[in-house]
Amino acid sequence: MSLPLWFDPALCLIGGEWVPPRTGATLPLVNPSDGSDLARIARGGSDDIDAAVNAAHTARAGAWGKMTALERGRILTRIGQIVLERADDLAVLEAADVGKPLTQARADAVALARYMEFYGGAADKVMGETIPYLDGYTVYTLREPHGVTAHIVPWNYPMQIIGRSVGAALAMGNACVLKPAEEACLTALAFAHIAQEAGLPEGALNVVPGLGAEAGAALSGHPRIQHISFTGSVATGALIQQAAGRNVVPVTLELGGKSPQLVFDDADLDEALPFLVNAGCQNAGQTCSASSRILVQRGVYDEVCRRMADAYGTLTVGPAMQDHRVGPLISARQKEIVEGFLGKGADLRVAARGVLVDNAPDTGAYVLPTLFADVPPDHPLARDEIFGPVQVIIPFDTEEEATVIANSTDYGLVASVWSRDGARQMRLARKLQAGQVFLNNYGAGGGVELPFGGVGKSGHGREKGFEALYGFSVLKTVAARHG
Ligand code: NAD
């Protein structure tokens, strides 16, 4: 496949220069739609990370650190404009690399542009406050950047996650070191090239691809990193938090989920149905905020099962470039993990499966979307994050029972309530343990403007929206005694 690669993907960006990794090693990028080799990327190591962190400190002390918030905002906005102009190319790169259907990949490119616009516009609107204090004092607060921030991102939404984390960090004046996922990093590299084109000063953004245990561990444990933003699995998140603890730096963890949608007898099912299915199958279910549990009240249970099963019958699965509803999983390894979960569901009723298109290559990482019904809430498929196109339907009788089931996993990222009863909506918005609650809708991850993050094993800290700007800054209190 010919890719719109206008750059050499085997290089790292360090201090404004595209350089081969000091390790001299590269890694293959595989196209999950057919298993073919796409490109080779740098296999960065600790020396590359060290150089990138030092370059970021130099940028903070130089042109980047001296820029006004207005100037930073203008650069971010320019990045957003170029991303929009190149959205088609970025979509092709993402579709090839991640296996995301083209339409979804393009939507991610547009979201990346939107993050840049949002944080570009917000950069000069972060304000401190004055605090009434003792007689003869004036006290005020300042929001200052942490300094050098580390960004370790996964493969499932590279553009969106880079947008929300690097965008907010740059807006506050931090200098960033980005470690994209080894499975998918073409758009991270493309983004860095675009940022340079838009005039981002050297060293403000450094990119070192590589393996988690090598470049990732070197970055999270680097003594000169001043903040870590991590998105990925719970197991890696725990390691990152330990590394941050050793250096006493703040860390934001965006981890997994098992997000429920609660459908009550009085719900508008016509409205709910598309959300119930899409929220589980978008990006082949490889979405931290995927809705993998559908809790349905008995009065509409059979109807919801039947209508969701019908919808699954329209879920075509095939190569990303053919833009079906569902693409392949990211890798053969992820396919094996998801198939392992499907095996655990052998005792369950399969209500429906999606449809593999005829010309899907055998060498692609395809898994048919699978809908299980009548699932006991304590079944492993109802509790564990699968990270594939698998949803379970769980029946319930009362609002209280639904609340207990919804809150019964280790996770708490997103939840939604489908009901026409306003009082019930308000009650559940408070009772559901989740970082985001949607009432009569479901935004997987929500909009750019909406603070996002989890409770429990879903992580801590908030990204997105204005809130992220607080996370990527430090509050300083200044107390002046003037008599
Ligand atoms: P992962 O944790 O294996 O990898 C994520 C990133 O961490 C990659 O860049 C990887 O190279 C790096 N990494 C791996 N080991 C490391 C180590 N020891 N030290 C430092 N960095 C290391 O996760 P994954 O398999 O790429 O992604 C899937 C998981 O991510 C799922 O569990 C999913 O729920 C979660 N996720 C969460 C969100 C969110 O916003 N909450 C978003 C996307 C994915």
Image (tube, grey):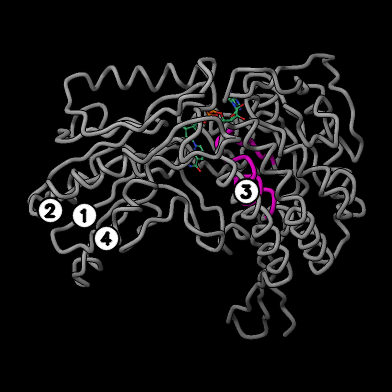
Cα gap from disc 1 to disc 4, whole angstroms? 12 Å
The tally of labels here is 4
**In the rendered structure, which disc, 1 or 2, sits on the residue that comes first in sequence?**
1
Cα gap from disc 3 to disc 2, whole angstroms? 36 Å
Q: Position of residue 259 (x, y in %)?
A: 34, 44
* Magenta run includes residue 310: no
Q: Which mark is residue 106?
A: 3
Q: Secondary structure at mark 3?
A: helix
Amino acid type at mark 2: Val
* 10 Å crowding of disc 2: few (<14), some (14-19), many (20+): some
Q: Eyeballing the image, is 479 above or below 104?
A: below
Q: Nearer the viewer, mark 1 or mark 3?
A: 3
What are the residue bounds of the magenta stretch?
150-167
**In the rendered structure, which disc, 4 or 2, sits on the residue that comes first in sequence?**
4
The residue wearing badge 4 is 270
Q: Are marks 1 and 2 in contact (CB under 8 Å)?
A: yes
- Give the residue at x 42% y 45%: 289
The residue wearing badge 2 is 300
Q: Which mark is residue 263?
A: 1
